[in-house]
Amino acid sequence: MREAAIAAATAPAAPDHGVSFGEAIPVWARIAALSFGGPAGQIAVMHRILVEEKRWIGESRFLHTLNYCMLLPGPEATQLAVYIGWLLHKTKGGLVAGTLFVLPGFLSIMVLSWVYAAFGNVGIVAALFFGLKAAVLAIVFEAVVRIGKRSLKNRVMLSLAAAAFVAIFVFDVAFPLIVLAAGLIGYFGARAGHPAFLVESGHGTSKEAALADAESALGESIPAHAQPNLSWALRISGFLLALWLAPVALLLLFPGPGNVFTDIGVFFAQMAVVTFGGAYAVLSYVAQQAVESYGWLSPGEMLEGLGLAETTPGPLIMVTQFVGFLGAFRDPGALNPFVAGTLGGILTTWVTFVPCFLWIFLGAPFAERLRSNRALSAALAAITASIVGVILNLAVWFGLHVLFAEVNEIAIPGATIDAPVLSTINIPSLTLTAAAVIAVFRFKAGMIKVLAACSAAGVIEYLLLG
């Protein structure tokens, strides 16, 4: 009896919810391998596996967790994986879930970046990416429509989207300011009781036969480790903050400002703080800065990188790794270009994704106390509405540079706008883009099918016409 008591006392404690850490690892690996199609597809995969299939977390708690992640800068799907992993198995659960979610995309984009850098100018490879750009353009327009249907539920939300588009496209207002303004409008609008802001925030998950929190393995109560603990939050966040910014600080010291690696580290570290609203909104900011300010790649190459990220598992924002790779590859200094590109891609991924763990471990214990806060939900709804305008800006910006060889800036009072030179329209690109749009909107063709068909069409066009 005494030996049995000692054995029981020294045995590892089983999780209260009955889901072992060993059981969770292959599930997170499976989610990562199936996470195609951008954040909407990734969130849907997590919901299907974690809520419907495994029944580890209830519907209401899943949506609350997603809402919190939507309010954070950076990739919300990655942060959702970290949050749920942390809820289930404490810090180690969050670290494993987040790392496994990112790893397949990191490896895939790194390999494809090498292929692109080595063979991207070869005719048949260029033709493949020509078709890929047309498909991605159609997919981005579809994202505008899909998110718009979900979030623009009244004239106020529609006005927020329109104002966001005009602000960023015409007046070049900084993206973080647009998000901040929208969030404040939604928050105070709900506090004032305005009915336009008292909307439910759905994210594409089905509510038919929704799993109640109490019926899930996690339950409806807050786990002991998820209780607010300021001391723990400060310790873990301090460690992650140092881990995140140490490479940037070293680069600022040596080789110093003006070096491509320093520029990459500083830019993408800043991006991790100021980019709200999901991957497509982030890409609007990254594309304009990486192309127009730093000159790391062309608009067409940015769209090709987005196509690579669309066709590989993991976060769509992994396209930033492609950007960092090309930026360093083309300015390698004394390094071999492929070594420089690899280091640039690794640095970009590091400073982009380490903050995901920081935001969750610092804020999630306090976010658990904020479920059912209507004002915060309204802020999220307003931000999502403004994101529609930002994504529309991304679609228009891509469209101008894909469909036309020349784009001019036209001055208007107080601002400038990009306008195409109509005589430089690319007829093959327009034809293929129109076909992709019809496939996506009329025939509801899946993303992978559209990407594969357009890529094949680009290759066929090259083989037939040269």
Image: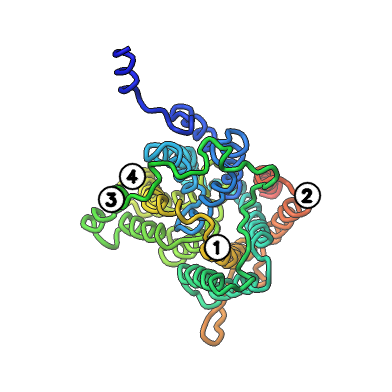
Q: Do the residues labelled 4 and 1 touch (CB within 8 Å)?
A: no
Amino acid type assigned to the residue bearing label 2 in the image: Phe
Q: In this view, does 108 lie above or below 200?
A: above
- Please indicate whether residue 244 sits to the left or right of residue 439 in the image: left
Would residue 405 be seen by someone viewing this image from the given angle? no
| x, y percent for residue 281 | 53, 61
Which residue is tagged 1? 374
Amino acid type assigned to the residue bearing label 1 in the image: Arg
| x, y percent for residue 394 | 57, 63
Q: Do the residues labelled 1 and 3 touch (CB within 8 Å)?
A: no
Which residue is tagged 4? 336
Q: Residue furthest right?
A: 442
Q: Earlier in the sequence, mark 2 or mark 1?
A: 1
Residue 231 marker: 3
Residue plotted at (37% across, 28% down): 13
| 217 or 444: nearer the viewer | 217
- Look at the numbered disc 3 and give the secondary structure of its residue: helix
Residue 443 marker: 2
Amino acid type assigned to the residue bearing label 3 in the image: Ser
Q: In this view, does 249 lie above or below 181?
A: above
Tell me the colour scheme of the image: rainbow
Q: Which of marks 4 and 2 is nearer the N terminus?
A: 4
